[in-house]
Amino acid sequence: MTDFERELAEALRGQAEEVTPDLDAAWAEQQRRQQRPPSRRRAAVWVAPLAAVLVVLTSVLLATQLHTAPPAQPGAPLVYSKFTPEPMPSLFGQYDSVRLTDFVGQTNTWTAYAFRTEGRGGLTELLCVASVPTGRPLAIGIPLYGDGPRCIPTEDLPPHGVRAAYIGDPLGPLPPDKAVFLTDPTLRTLRLFASNGDLTQARPVGRLSDFLVYVADVTPGSPPVRFQIS
């Protein structure tokens, strides 16, 4: 073998050693991986399923809250005014009145009115509700249903919206299945909601000076508790 042939063989053998895989090193790496602590392998097994379960439980909880959350209640809370009895002789004339409704009592058919007047020595303007026998005038000396007029000073009323609200009573002067509402005259509709969500549309029956007067049919024992206006 010539010197050239020997040098070529040595060069080829060196290149072969460079590209030959290190099988011993690869085997050692495989053994190292297989000998990894069992806790790591177990963690990899249960972490992914647990994450999936948490996602499902969170979705179910959110859906349950959406279905069980109480629905938003419409309108605003309705506050009934404190109408108090006033003796008819203490009222100084009726400026104007609005007929509310007719109803049947034990012995007569009655007509209920809302009216403005002066009371307490003529120093206070009052809004009142009273009922007289149908066909008779609203005046002193005429029989009255129940314990007489119920009144409230206008100075105690809010300036806008539902300014006064009165619900009937078995003792009068309005029957318990009726309610009257006095609003500012800019309103056009008045919707009433009972505690169970039942809707009642109040109907306008007239204007009393700077008040618009509405009457509504109500269920005794379940009066409206919220209202919407427009």
Image (cartoon, helix red, strand yellow):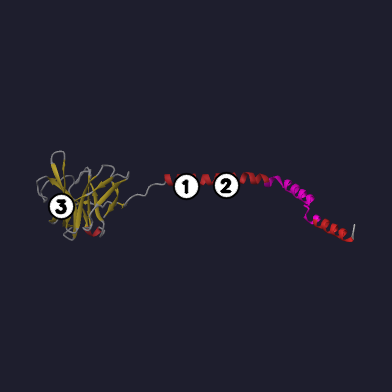
| C-alpha separation, residue under disc 1 versus residue under disc 3 | 54 Å
Q: Secondary structure at mark 2?
A: helix
User: SS of the residue at dot 3?
Assistant: strand
Q: Along the polypeptide, which appears first: circle 2 or circle 1? A: 2
Q: Which residue is mark 1?
A: 62
**Mark 2 crowd level (few <14, some 14–19, many ≥20, 10 Å Cα):** few
Q: Which amino acid type is shown beneath numbered disc 3?
A: Val
| Type of amino acid at the residue the image marks with label 2 | Ala
Mark 3 lies on residue: 98
Disc 2: which residue = 51
Query: Residue at image x 83%, y 56%?
Result: 13
Q: Alpha-carbon neighbours of circle 3 within 10 Å: few (<14), some, or many (≥20)? A: some
Q: CA distance from mark 3 to mark 2?
A: 70 Å
Q: Earlier in the sequence, mark 1 or mark 3?
A: 1
Q: Position of residue 22 (x, y in %)?
A: 78, 52
- Expressed as whole percent of the image width and height from the top left, the position of residue 132 reads 13, 46
Magenta range: 16-40
Amino acid marked by disc 1: Leu
